Amino acid sequence: MPTLTIDNLEVTVPEGTNVLEAARALDIVIPHFCYHEALGAVGACRLCAMRISDGKVSGIQMACMVKARDGMVVSTLDPEAVELRGHVIEWLMTNHPHDCPVCDEGGECQLQEMTIAGGHGNRRYTGKKRTYDNQDLGPYIAHEMNRCIACYRCVRTYRDYCGGLDFGVFGSRDRVYFGRVRDGQLESPFSGNLVDVCPTGVFTDKTFRFRSRPWDLQEAPSICPLCSLGCATVPGARFREVQRVRAGINREVNGFFICDRGRFGNGATNDPQRPRRPRVDGAQVAMETAIDTLRERVAAVIAKYGPQSVALLGSPRASLEANTLLHDWARDLGTTRLVFDAHAEQDRAARITEAHLEHQARSLNDIRHSDLVVLVGTDPLSEGPMLALAVRQAVRAGGGVVVIGPKPIDLPCRCSHLPVSADQLDDALRCLAGGSADALAAELRDALKELRDRLAAAQRPVMAGGPELLGSRGVNTLFETVEALSTAERPMGAMLLLNGPNSYGGAMLAGRGPNFDMLLDGIDEGRIHALICLETDPCRDARNPARARTALDRLELLVTLDALPTHAALNADIFLPTSTWVESDGAFVNNEGRLQAFARVMEPGLPLRATSPDSYPPREFFLETPGSEPWPAWRILARLLGRSEELSVLRREIADADPRFAPLADLAPDAPGIRLTTTPGLPHYQLDRETPG
Amino acid sequence: MNLWRDIKGTLQAYAVTFSYLFRKPTTIQYPEERRTPAPRYRARMVLTRDPDGGERCVACHLCSAACPVDCISMQAAEAPDGRRYAAWFRINFARCIFCGLCAEACPTLAIQMSPEYEICKRDPLSLVYEKEDLLIGDGGKDNDYNFYRHAGIGVVNPRGGNADEYGPVDPGALVP
């Protein structure tokens, strides 16, 4: 632990830290381009120059290339270092075009900031500027090579960190070119990160092209709702529409990057077809009226058939607050027919995960530092792309990856593949745990035995699986296998890719309740007459969508709270529009049990582009924003239950009522999140022990 | 003596006022009479055109960022030739304080202050000017400047075709 002095301030940093990082620990900003926490230091931009007096490496040095040593004395304000940095900026600017007004990076451009910081204002160089031809990199990334300052961050991100192969650096001397061999869409599913890492405007978001300046955007720390990993994102909205999403920083989960699905897959909020008006029997009404009608209708069904005739369906898409209020409502109504995932098998897998994960839980950061990752029956690039990226980091650090599954999967890294058919995954896991496995081929048994030895030798092994192929039985076996392969001094970790951003939270609330297939039985047999769907469409999300569709037609009362134009929303007797995750505050519990909050980015409203198709905003004034009817789902339920509509109060109440959710009371967005622990004494869910509906 | 001084002070003021009765008045009978302000007078802003007749405004949002009363809003768009322009540009002159910061911030000389200072309407909405109301036919105080001839990203000239640029490099070239 060396202790060094930077600008007369002493700091003690871990062994191996470079001077730039040590200065950051003191909140001293040293200008830099090529250094990036996730990509490391390469000393290419020569901008982090500073004077080191005393010691072996004295003189003007690059801060990112010098390891902090005990007794080092560093000056970032040394006149010679400041002058050198000013010259470096001036050199970088000799070829940079004069196009900041038409560049999308303007306003969040590191080169702009460093040019100002370096004091460079007047162009003294009278020579001509170098130019390049651009490439068409597909519909997501715009390319403008003239702006390049050759910091190599893009290649280091795309090739080294994300494992893309179709992008690179070409040419020699001052002709270096960052692009593809020929025009074409970037193939990596992480290509959008080029936009975030490029310190200037070479790579910009094409979907956001010329839409807004960063200072005009409404931004807030958020959580990606598109898979169960819970990556940090920062959506940006203007004129009542989500215009872009950029990566947030959560060192425990996604690190600094996100996948392209999370970045470019956020059109639902802006959809002009989105149902935004509350409806009762097809007629548009005010939200308060709809809530009152809902209360009356449910009471009428209960009066007619008894409380158990009402079923409630939560969702992995809905926030923890909304799901908890749904849970409380079911308790108030006196019905036990409450489910939190329309897909019975995914629901079961989530509940098993919730019950078993506890000490086996591993974050994406743990996977990045794992030395052997076993992927069982999962395709991370489709179920949770950032897992694939985390696995790649494990491989880059010298770890190994073994894929067990029916067919080889695409991974951005080298991996070995054990072909096991979907129905034999369970046996293969048992065999791996040391059980007998006569059904398996001898070849496979040998390979699994070898893998067992490798796992025994590994220091930080993790096994990751996906319920879609494993099924709930397979998920259970995976946990047993991990338990069997763990020892006290070297525990093994597990990670399950669940159905949605809040699957884990729903599972915590579900307990031993029925599953949705049981509810469908109940509807078919005439025991259930009313169904309340919270941000889910059983006709799409259920294990058997066709069966759900016929069952829904049998209902006497179908209530849907949702933000999407789904079948259940359009055919509901009572429809209550909810706001999407960018339009409300809330919390999700990700697949490792990490409770994370997301903050509201904007108020709900019909995008200006939808209200004014000719692109001129209206000249009249309205007191009410068009399309602003949706409420957050938790607020609708709070109004219905007569609870507080203040989120902080609501969170405090939830935290007080259930000790498992205690961290919810003081939860802040833009934080690494808190991994929930299951309180001993509360009933754990057990496989095949669902109470029939 | 104090009394004398007071009487003198009172009468002197009347004498000054009286003498002004026989001079030509400085005030004019506005609005019947109007002054022509100097060409450099800075009243309401206009949007100018480049020498080729194209709109100079590239909708960079710097004027709206600089505006202390937030009276400018716009939306940028892209023309087929890659030119960035304002799909709409709106200024609320009911709110404008004529400070001129927008013209100072404008990097393309599009916004210039004009001598038109008479903005007074009964309907506040008619003080909301759109791009069409603001555009004038020429380059205002500088008729020669064309931003895209200096920007260095093509659009008006082919890439690398401006006077201060080399043609596009061939990254495949092996010459040292």
Image: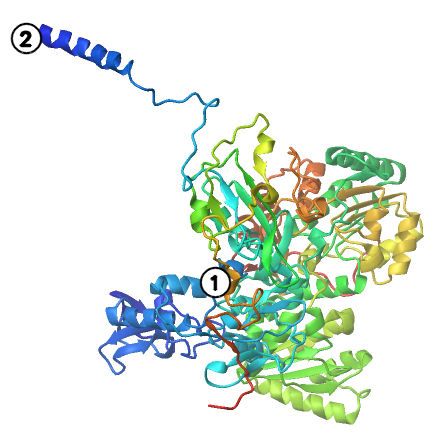
Q: Position of residue A596 (x, y in %)?
A: 58, 57
Helix, strand or loop for disc 2: loop
Q: Kindly identify which chain the residue marked by label 2 belongs to.
A: B
Query: Residue B38, how many percent across, how many down?
Result: 40, 38
A262 and A86: which is toward the camera = A86
Residue B34 lies, with reference to residue A275, above or below; the image says: above
Residue farthest left in this picture: B1
Could you tell me which secondary element the residue under label 1 belongs to?
loop
* Front residue of this view, candidates A277 and A452: A277
Q: Gap between marks 1 and 2, in whole Å?
A: 75 Å
- Where in the figure is residue A269, as x and y percent of width and height? 69, 52
**Left or right side of A617 for A521:** right
In the image, is A106 to the left or to the right of B19?
right
The residue drawn where x is 47% and y is 34% is: B117
In this orientation, which residue lies closer to the viewer: A181 or A487?
A: A181
Q: Can residue A676 be seen here?
A: no
Q: Percent x, y for residue A212?
A: 57, 54
Few, some or many residues within 10 Å of mark 2 (<14, 14–19, 20+): few
Query: Which residue is located at x 89 percent, y 51 percent?
Result: A552
Give left or right: position of A470 versus A387. right
Query: Which residue in the protein does label 1 denote?
Result: A109
Residue at 78% over, 36% down:
A290
What number is the disc on residue B1?
2
Residue B25, quarter of the rendered image: top left
Quarter of the image that includes the N terminus of chain B: top left
Query: Which amino acid, by three-letter code, is at mark 1?
Result: Cys
Q: Is residue A392 above or below residue A110?
A: below
Amino acid beneath label 2: Met
Between circles 1 and 2, the one closer to the viewer is 2
